[in-house]
Amino acid sequence: MRKWSNAPTSESEVKANRLPGANNAVLAQQAQLLHLEHKLDLYLQFEIARALPADTAAAFTSSPKDQGTKDVACEFLAHAASIGKKISKVVVVAHRYHFERCRLVLQRMSITGVPTRNQYSGFDPEESQPRAMSPEEMIVNDFASMAGMALDA
């Protein structure tokens, strides 16, 4: 897998380099199981959606660009509203270390976020997103994001 820089210079760089890696493959498996077992509509970040098997369709996939959690959630809400649905509770398919930030972002949007039954906590040193390469990168990234959220409050 090709690496991408911490500060992508163009949207084409993001599209070319943010391919589904091992982390997103595991998250896609979790999403697929939720869909099969509970008939849940899948609203997925594009990297996870790209890792789904061909026989599993997402109800909506985020834009293939580098965005924050809130921006992705806003895309999901806008799509749901466009088809007459209101999202108030979701199962968050995310890395265990990333779940709390997702939950806080959703809470600010009046959405209840619950974790998957078996939260994934692995890391892939070949991952294209630096924050998903090691526990230290993930903790620092999400801590900085949550600190920024506190300043916005």
Image: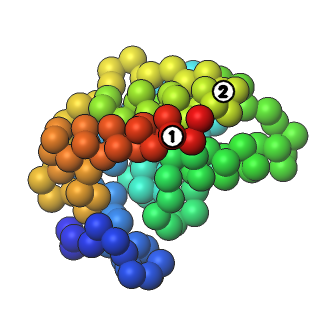
Residue 7 vertical placement versus 28 (above, below): below
Figure quadrant of residue 138: top left
Q: Which residue is mark 2?
A: 111
Front residue of this view, candidates 144 and 133? 144
The residue tagged with tag 2: helix, strand or loop?
loop
Image location (x, y in percent) of residue 63:
57, 63
Q: Quadrant of the N terminus?
A: bottom left
Residue located at (50% from left, 53% from top): 68
The residue tagged with tag 1: helix, strand or loop?
helix
Image location (x, y in percent) of residue 36:
52, 29
Image location (x, y in percent) of residue 51:
39, 53
Number of numbered labels in the structure image: 2
Residue located at (33% from left, 38% from top): 143
Check disc 2 and give the amino acid type.
Ile
Please indicate whether residue 107 sits to the left or right of residue 121 in the image: right
Q: Residues within 10 Å of mark 1 (few under 14, many from 20)?
A: few
Figure quadrant of residue 21: bottom left
Residue located at (33% from left, 58% from top): 20
Q: Which residue is mark 1?
A: 151
Q: Earlier in the sequence, mark 1 or mark 2?
A: 2
Kindly indicate whether the residue at mark 2 contacts the one at mark 1 (C-beta within 8 angstroms): no
Q: Quadrant of the C terminus?
A: top right
Q: Nearer the viewer, mark 1 or mark 2?
A: 1
Residue at the limit of the structure toward the right, as seen here = 84
Front residue of this view, candidates 3 and 41? 3
Front residue of this view, candidates 108 and 111? 108
Check disc 1 and give the amino acid type.
Leu
